[in-house]
Amino acid sequence: MNHRTESAVRLVILLAIGTMAGAAAFTHVHDLSVAHGQPNWIGWANAVAVELMAIYLGLELRARRRTRRPVGLVASLLVAFALLSLAAQVAEAEPSVWGWTVAAVPSLAFLALVKVVLSNTPATPPTPEPDQPPTDRYEVPEQAPTDPDPERPAAPVPPAVPAPAVISAPAAVLPPRGVVQPNRPHVVGIIR
């Protein structure tokens, strides 16, 4: 099986598991909300909020790690929403170990799938701006002759020895707190 076929099979399996696990998790949260007095549309709103929040928080956690920003609050919220989803799955299950285990499968599969997908994408370090001068070489400026007597023969100039190359890792430069990065949209009302 070549790489392209294997990638296509993995994508189909990923979509099938994600669709079924997501549908089951959404349905459990919806049904629990409706069973406890919420209108039908609010049940679906709760399901969307709980399940998609886990995905968003996983993406946000990855973005914060990539830019070396604090992840404590985001990680705590991710655990809280994962536990909330899991609690909705087992709330109406048969009160036994197997009942709770089988009821938890959709939520656990959905969260595991999100984790696998997010951990497979390679994190690329920030690239330097194209208008910045390269920092990995050292240029020696040419020196003009300073001999005032043009009649006198000049002394031989020894060949220039190239300076060793300086290799530096790209540094992540972050704006001061409170400054919105131009490449990230600023949304009022969301904690970042």
Image: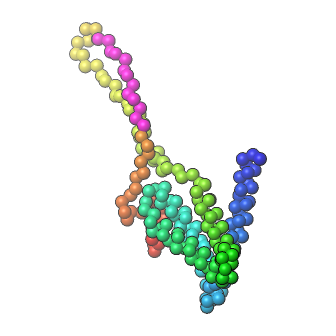
Q: Residue 42 in the image: state x and y as whole percent.
A: 61, 84
Quadrant of residue 105 in the image? bottom right
Q: Residue 63 location in percent, x, y? A: 50, 59
The residue under the point 46% across, 74% down is 189
Is residue 1 located in the magenta-colored stretch of the structure?
no
Point out residue 93 in the picture as x, y percentages from the top left corner: 67, 81
**Can see residue 173?**
yes
Q: Position of residue 166 (x, y in %)?
A: 40, 35
Residue found 72% across the figure and 47% down from its top: 3
> In the displayed image of the protein, which residue is found farthest to the right?
1
36 or 149: nearer the viewer: 36
User: Please, is residue 38 above or below residue 142 in the view?
Assistant: below
Viewer-nearest residue: 143 or 27: 27
- Count of marks placed on residues: 0
Residue at the farthest left position: 148
Residue 30 seen in the figure: no
Which residue is painted at 57% across and 52% down in the image? Answer: 122
The quadrant of the picture occupied by the C terminus is bottom left
Q: Residue furthest front?
A: 97
Q: Is residue 19 left or right of residue 165?
A: right
Given residues 176 and 77, the one toward you in this image is 77
Describe the colour scheme in one phrase: rainbow
Q: Is residue 166 magenta?
A: yes
Is residue 69 placed above or below 143 in the rendered structure? below
Work out whether 23 lies above or below 3: below
Q: Residue visible at 44% across and 45% down?
A: 170
- Residue 169 falls in which quadrant of the image? top left
* Residue farthest along the bottom direction in this orientation: 37
Q: Main secondary structure of the magenta part?
A: loop
**Residue nearest the observer in this picture, 129 or 151:** 129
Viewed as shown, does residue 162 lie left or right of 29?
A: left
What residue range appears in magenta? Answer: 155-167
